[in-house]
Image (cartoon, rainbow, N blue to C red):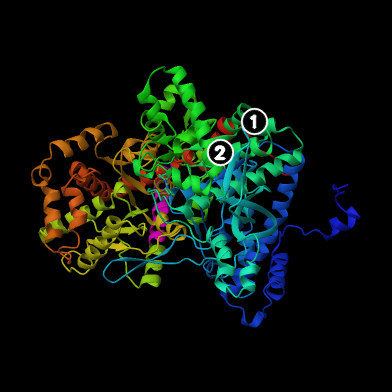
Amino acid sequence: SGKEKWPRGEEKVWKEGMRDLDTDVSSITKSFVNHVQTSLARQPYNLDNLGAYQAAALSVRDNLLVNWNETALQYTRKAPKRAYYLSLEFLMGRTLDNALLNLGLKEKYAEGVKSLGFSMEDVLDQERDAALGNGGLGRLAACYLDSSASQELPLWGYGLRYKYGIFQQLISPAGDQLEAPDPWLDNQNPWELPRLDVAYEVRFYGHADRLNDGTPRAVWAGGQEVLAVAYDVMIPGCYTKTTNNLRLWESKPKRGFDLNSFNAGNYEGAVESSNSAAAITSVLYPNDHTTFGKELRLKQQYFWTAASLADILRRFKNIGKPITEFPEYVAIQLNDTHPTLAIPELMRILIDEEDQPWETAWKIVTNTFFYTNHTVLPEALEKWPVPLLEHVLPRHLQIIYDINLFFLQSVEKKFPGDRDRLARMSLIEEGFPKQVRMAFLACIGSRKVNGVAELHSDLVKTTILKDFVEFEGVSKFGNVTNGITPRRWLDQCNPELSALISRTLKVDKSVWLKELPRLEELLPLTEDAAFREEWAAIKQRNKERLAHHVQTTLGLTINTKAMFDVQIKRLHEYKRQTLNILGVIHRYLTLKNMSAEDKKKVNPRVVFFAGKAAPAYYIAKLTIRLIVNVARIINADPDTKDLLSLYFLPDYSVSLAEVLIPASDISQHISTAGTEASGTSNMKFCLNGGLLLGTVDGANIEIAEEVGESNVFFFGHLTPAVEDLRYQHTYHPVPIEEKCPALAHVLNQVSGGLFGDADVYEPLLNTIRQGDYYLLSDDFDSYIAALAMVDEAYLDQTEWVKKSIRTTAKMGKFSSDRAINEYAESYWNIEAQRIA
Ligand code: F58
């Protein structure tokens, strides 16, 4: 009768056959050699580093699988409430090193691999990054997976298995960004388990006909059906058996190809539908903070939410509870508005397939979903054209219209006759075409809404969702300040610092890495000269490690005696890399005019940039070009090159960040106030003892609250001033020459061709001369003053190192463990499960 006994046959025989965890070097080498021989079908004598990486990965994977199976089994048996993190992006980076550290097996594997003739470092270096994300939002999702497993929380991620991740960035000799595809799966991916048995059909197009039988039901039929196939990625917790799952969907044609066309000799036609099915998960959209409006993007979003919901629902049904109890077993987190179609999709399932009344369905939905907003930039708020939705998802559009109707009726009841309010709050924005406002849909369809840092969460409540706060009450709107995992962003990327901390605290890292506020115990050591020396020596070796990396990959020699000043993030006008490069030019011009005597007092500085620009973002690409060409000139200028040099490191990635971050003395987080929702790299730098130069924005504010304002370098106008300043720019513009002569001088040098291409940069410079939406001319003078304060502070190395230690010591709050526990307790209501 369907249900079979487990295990089949004799339990004893099964148990004897089960693989144990590797705990000693000899079982590790044995499993490594076995994989070389069988899984890889290779001979020991010609095994290269890539083969060694693959064998090591397969062997580690076996260990993860033991824990992963046990975790899944216990979740199934105990049926606790589970949380699901729906994110279109998971920026995982490399896995092997992280898995070894979380398992506590790194030393033993290193020893085993060495005895077989390989170096662990070379082996680790073979792995390609899993780069299924653009930036902060995708990396946050990866940190949250690490933390949920480490905190033993029953959480799964759901995303898409893009065949191509974020593009590879090449920089032409002229300084132009070129994009190349990222075929990250070409060498096989040992970290994924194809689950060809876990597959769902997903429909697009067709027609939706209401039954009009007194129920809200409709039938959606016709159109195209594609298959979603699951690939599972194991997510090991740190020093725990808990190993969670990230399920990524791949699209496939429902049938291989169309036999009728094939038989009629129409071979292209025969594979057309199979190509269009495969296209859905072929590539990650590389845009950042702009909307797409593209049919394929909409299909990605629906394909992923439909498959994920079907999977979640099937798992819930196995528990055997009535559907009305769904929210007691399931919490679904919407990472930004990208998965918002899950709201009408769950309504569709409950109404059309489960035959639930509208009110019951809506109650289930609004108790299941939670929505995190990651930006208040207007151009980044998702809207889908009504005609496109009607074409691709006709039933969902009907449901959205119904949700809107009931919603506006309740608004009208609370604010009778307030027509402006109804227009402002409608899910449908009037216009040609009409558009569905996804943030509003996510908001009203969710139990709670949150921003990602205090300032940002306040801005969400007072700007984009103000009307909704007035209508639904403020308690629905909260804040969860972002966090980062200290496993990857300290233990893995900065092993020497991690070891120093363990030695000093006299606590094993398995403890403090999961109780990060314990770093505070470092504070008294600021007064210990020997400790400071060790601290500084580690920073110095990390700088040399970075210099070595740049030497071997780019052939450039870097002055490791200089201060390392780093800005690494997506290129965007609001993040103001332009302010930084104009500041560099200002410094260069100042140095050029200095006497030899004065130059002796100047501390040398090396400025690093890295980051990708969206392929169609012209101004961001021009900024890269300017940086590269300024570097070309100043790095070759004998007058100044010992005191100032500049590098744009191509193809920024998680792995490159792991080398750059521990090497930084100062990092820049200089967005226009109120524009950067949180930022997370700011936390990573500070955790590694780098000081912060930034604006009063996002999580910079909370970092300063923790480490103390005297340990950060703040500058620039505050958020409340921004609106007024923009108004001034528009209605009472003052020429830059008058307002900020220092900036005008720098702009004129660029226009004058000091860095070549006199005309090329005009469109970029004009964004500042005209309108200056991101307020560079308002903040330039205070920025230059802040840079001078950094110089000044760096001269007193003792005090600088104290600031560095204090900074690390006070970063406990920014562990993603703290953040994930806030979600678990105050949002999802899920509990830790000990896996025995
Ligand atoms: C980022 N958003 C925020 N979006 O900009 C950053 O301040 C914050 O720290 C981070 O989220 C985590 O909360 C972000 O990275 C994207 O990359 C989207 C990708 C898809 C299209 C829209 C932007």
593 w.r.t. 4: above or below: below
Q: Residue at x 42, y 18 (%)?
A: 415
636 w.r.t. 380: above or below: below
Residue 102, how many percent across, how many down? Answer: 61, 53
Dot 1 beta carbon under 8 Å from ligand 1: no
Q: Residue at x 36, y 57 (%)?
A: 614
Residue that numbered label 1 is attached to: 215
Q: Foreground: 337 or 302?
A: 302
Neighbourhood count class around disc 2 (C-alpha, 10 Å): few under 14, some 14–19, many 20 upward: many
Residue that numbered label 2 is attached to: 344
513 w.r.t. 15: above or below: above
Q: Dot 2: what SS?
A: helix
- Per the picture, the main secondary structure of the magenta-coloured stretch is helix
Magenta residues, as a range? 525-543
Left or right: residue 225 compared with residue 813: right
**Label 2 is placed on what type of residue?**
Pro
